[in-house]
Amino acid sequence: MFVAHGLTKIYRMGEVEVPALRGVDLEIYSGEFVVLLGPSGSGKSTLLNILGGLDTPTSGEAHWRDHDLAKSDERELTRYRREHVGFVFQFYNLIPSLTVRENVALVTDICPHPMDVDEAIGLVGLSERANHFPSQLSGGEQQRVAIARAIAKRPDVLLCDEPTGALDYTTGKVVLEVIARINQEFGTTAVVITHNAAIAGMADRVMRLADGRITSVEHNQNKLRPAELSW
Ligand SMILES: Nc1ncnc2c1ncn2[C@@H]1O[C@H](COP(=O)(O)OP(=O)(O)OP(=O)(O)O)[C@@H](O)[C@H]1O
């Protein structure tokens, strides 16, 4: 689904150049669950943002199917994101003045083949809370709304940047269960960034980054359910 070759990203801030990616090659297959692990500053978010069309590389190739993400203009990237990519971030970015249902409907109103809003909310186990506002929900519930919003467009890929970073142990596992379920039931490719090495246990493949490079890629022989993970 994704192929990258020699991907680099250098952020320029005045005179200072910050190399975030220093030549990344990767392939991600359709339907896979990939975990990206690595220390702070190793380039994980930069890589995810390029795969999601939120940022562009300085050099190198990045393809999503037959789309050339490195050469796409802003309009093409917006369309790519809207039609194909669901994002989940550490902070939920819900609109406080809208209910759960309205937050999810924001997305279904602008994409071509959306899921029914209530179906998406049901998939994350929040049907009873559809008319509540974000402030009436716990952090884990708000993250599940963010996931419902991301999947309601029926994305081909779900890109998650530290989805459990702000959550406690138990709530984090519930959120991971939801992501695993979407990956399995819909075949949605999932790429999840985490600092937590235990979460790697639920991946098909684990990619480790250090200093802007992929340093290892491991296949998981015994993929675990989130409930079986402990940290
Ligand atoms: N917009 C930006 N402008 C300048 N430098 C940036 C920008 N975004 C990222 N960087 C730098 O690029 C490098 C990689 O950052 P990135 O956020 O991709 O790492 P990360 O592995 O996701 O880190 P973390 O786990 O802390 O989120 C860091 O040195 C960071 O300071």
Image (cartoon, rainbow, N blue to C red):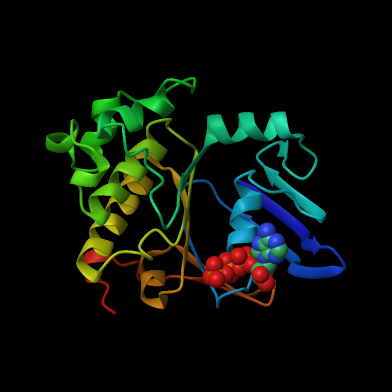
Ligand 1 picture quarter = bottom right
How many marks are shown on the rendered structure? 0
Q: Where is residue 29 in the image (x, y as percent from the top left)?
A: 56, 51
Task: Give the image quarter of residue 131.
Answer: top left
Task: Give the image quarter of residue 210.
Answer: bottom right
For the view shown, which residue lies furthest in the left direction? Answer: 128
Residue 102 visible in the current orientation: yes
Q: Is residue 72 above or below residue 184?
A: above
| In the image: residue 144, left or right of residue 21 | left
Residue at 18% from the left image edge and 45% from the top image edge:
136
Task: Give the image quarter of residue 140.
Answer: bottom left
Residue at 60% from the left image edge and 46% from the top image edge:
52
Q: Where is residue 178 in the image (x, y as percent from the top left)?
A: 28, 50
Q: Position of residue 78 (x, y in %)?
A: 63, 32
Residue at 72% from the left image edge and 34% from the top image edge:
74
Q: Is residue 65 above or below residue 36?
A: above
Task: Give the quarter of the figure containing the C terminus.
Answer: bottom left
Q: Where is residue 132 in the image (x, y as percent from the top left)?
A: 18, 36
Residue 32 visible in the current orientation: no
